[in-house]
Image (cartoon, helix red, strand yellow):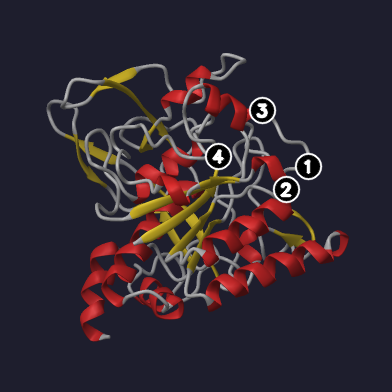
Amino acid sequence: MKVFILDTGIDYTHPDLAGLVVLDSSVSLLNHLTHPGNEDALALSLNQAPFLDFHSHGTSVASVIVSNGLLVAGVTRNTKLYSVKVHDQRRMGDVSVYVEGIIYAADHDADVIHLSIGMSFKKHEHPGAVAAINRATSYAHQKGAVIIAAAGNAMPPAVPTNFDADIDGFKFCNAVHVICVSATAPTSTTTDENGLLVGVNPDTWAPYSFYGRSTITVAGPGGGPVGTRTATTAVPLACSRWSQRIVDGTARCSRKPAVNPIGAIDAVWYSTGTTFAAAATSGLAALLVSKIGHGHPDKVAELIVKSADDLGQPGTDPYFGRGRINVVRALDMLKEF
């Protein structure tokens, strides 16, 4: 399955992602930004591809969708990733580049297009941007791609956006044919006598997650909020080792290394957010496409919605949409289709 990730790039040298990224069809669009940086040149100076990840957001998303299972576990094992680098190391980008990225993915027969784009703006101020984004998502849908976007986060002291109240606001979740994913967080966890996680108790809406009945399609596991975030309540993620080699010396992920089974030292970090809830949903979409085949985005969306655990208010809920995704049930429901 072909999953295109529009993000900060991917560390394709990470052992959990080695062999999973299609290098000759991945691309950096940073030179198309209004104010391009020097990341493409930096990557080339390191003898790496331009879409190398100097932030780690894209790498983390990738490791939730698919993984070799050495350090972290992805939802799938046989999915192929395509990096479309639309964000620089500050996660900054332009609408025109995001639109170009969606069209690029669609033209390369994407099965799933994953969007973790934080940008928001007022519709009345940028009607041309709204129209361009909707044209791009409609085109990708027509070409057979499932499009999944993260709802957005508001870490304290900020307050999450209520899509129902912010009717003039626009995020990629508001675009047509997009599955918009909010986040759930565990209420508590259970560990054994060695401190190893053995169970996660029923989840609830994550208080950092954007919400709104008009926009949220489903929810996914995003991890506990800041202040409660630990290795047992947050999402384990692959860290781009190149994010610690940025010119300004900033480390985007934890500097604490983990030893993988083959003895190499590679960083793993723990974080939370609707990004990772959406990544888990993109992984589920890839699994469903592997069974259904390319070109049935509405059928995949229907399965994701019908198989979800109906949390909160019955039916469509402002916090969970139609419910929290359930991978096992979704695959079981395939037998009915």
Residue at left offset 29%, top offset 68%: 290
> What distance separates the C-alpha of mark 4 from that of mark 2?
13 Å
Q: Earlier in the sequence, mark 2 or mark 3?
A: 3
- The residue identified by callout 4 is 8
Task: Depth check: give the residue in front, 84 or 298.
Answer: 84
> What distance separates the C-alpha of mark 2 from that of mark 3?
16 Å
Q: Earlier in the sequence, mark 1 or mark 4?
A: 4
Circles 1 and 4, Cβ within 8 Å, touching? The answer is no
Circles 1 and 2, Cβ within 8 Å, touching? The answer is yes
Q: Residue lying farthest top? A: 249
Res. 71 mark: none
| Left or right: 2, with 83 as reference point | left
Q: Earlier in the sequence, mark 4 or mark 2?
A: 4
- The residue identified by callout 2 is 94
Tell me the SS state at disc 1: loop
- The residue identified by callout 3 is 38
Q: Earlier in the sequence, mark 3 or mark 4?
A: 4
Q: Amino acid at mark 2?
A: Asp
Position of the C terminus, as image quadrant, is: bottom left
Q: Is residue 38 visible?
A: yes
326 to 264, vertically: above or below: below
Rendering quarter of residue 335: bottom left
Circles 1 and 3, Cβ within 8 Å, touching? The answer is no
> What distance separates the C-alpha of mark 3 from that of mark 4?
14 Å
| Left or right: 164, with 223 as reference point | right
**Neighbourhood count class around disc 3 (C-alpha, 10 Å): few under 14, some 14–19, many 20 upward:** few
| Left or right: 55, with 308 as reference point | right
Res. 34 mark: 1
Q: Residue lying farthest bottom? A: 337
Circles 2 and 3, Cβ within 8 Å, touching? The answer is no
Q: Position of residue 16 (x, y in %)?
A: 29, 37
